[in-house]
Amino acid sequence: SNSRVMVCMERSPELVAAILGIVRAGACYVPMDPTYPAERVGQMMEDSAPELVIASKDLASLFKGRKVPVTTFGELTARADDGPVPECPATAQDLCYVLFTSGSTGRPKGVAMHHGPLMNLIEWQVRTSVLGEGDRTLQFAPISFDVSFQEIFTTLAQGGTLVLIDDEDRLNSTKLLRTIREKQVDRLIVPFVALQYLAEAVQRTGEVPSSLKEVFTSGEQLRITPAIRDLFRQLPGCRFCNQYGPTEGHVVSELELTGDPDAWPELPNIGKPIDRVELLVLDERMERVPAGQEGELYLGGACVATGYIGRDDLT
């Protein structure tokens, strides 16, 4: 439990399998984007102190000269046997992943997230989602973003199917639209800008992603633009939710937009807290502010991460 394993692999079924294997063993995965500069890689390795790196064969050289053992997915599977799998030793308090913030305000911080908040998120989403066994979710988010955990684990917990997409198609709105249509994707979790580009692609091509049953947006302020209103007018049975949460809490709140899209506010709020989460708006004295006045948002309850790895001062 709590052993940290860094993962540096391209989008693939093997990447998902590696993450599942690490978590099943009771360890904690630390995703590494292979496009990161060497300085950031060094900072992440220093702070997270992984005991092992699992890399794609062509990415293993990125870790040459670093004092940590490196193995490839192929080497691991070649050594695997068909023997019984022991019970997972992890508890709700043990770490599941370490994700690093963008570092826009300085050195990136590694957010250590334990299983408890993630189980709470999975249970809440399984309870509230309209999806079920066999339904398809697109794995859109980079593996270094927390939304990728939501995509992978809530889908598998529902008995659903995870649809993978390569970066070229993911970043091209027309190809993204056609992937959704061709693969009959039921659920999409994307930031506002990707949703806007997708809505514009629908207007441009006249092709409607009519398989969609559920769309979540998160990661940045949602704006209801004319293109987005037009998209959801053509998806009358699709559930549309604005989700909010920092890396330190994952999803903490949700607003479901219902009714006529023409009546939706241009800037929707972030809704209400998910199960077992508390949201408070406090002033500088840590007291609740009156309704209608500004304050700072505090997160409490089941969502709060363990802390910043190796940065007790910031935690």
Image: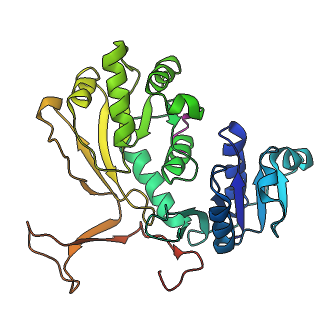
Residue 175 seen anywhere in this rendered image of the structure: yes
For the residue pair 259 and 205, the one nearer the viewer reads as: 205
Residue 181 location, x and y as percent?
Answer: 46, 19
Q: Residue at x 37, y 58 (%)?
A: 245
Q: Residue at x 82, y 44 (%)?
A: 57
Q: Position of residue 151 (x, y in %)?
A: 51, 44
Image quadrant holding the N terminus, namely: bottom right
Horizontal side of 155 relative to 218 (left or right) equals right
Q: Is residue 178 left or right of residue 228?
A: right
Residue 159's place in the image compared with 219, above or below, is above
**Residue 211 location, quadrant:** top left
Q: Is residue 187 left or right of residue 19?
A: left
Q: How many marks?
A: 0
Q: Residue at x 64, y 69 (%)?
A: 43
Colour scheme employed for the rendering of this structure? rainbow
Where residue 6 sits: x, y (%)? 70, 60
Q: Where does residue 116 sit, x and y in percent of width and height?
A: 51, 66
Q: Which residues are magenta?
A: 157-162
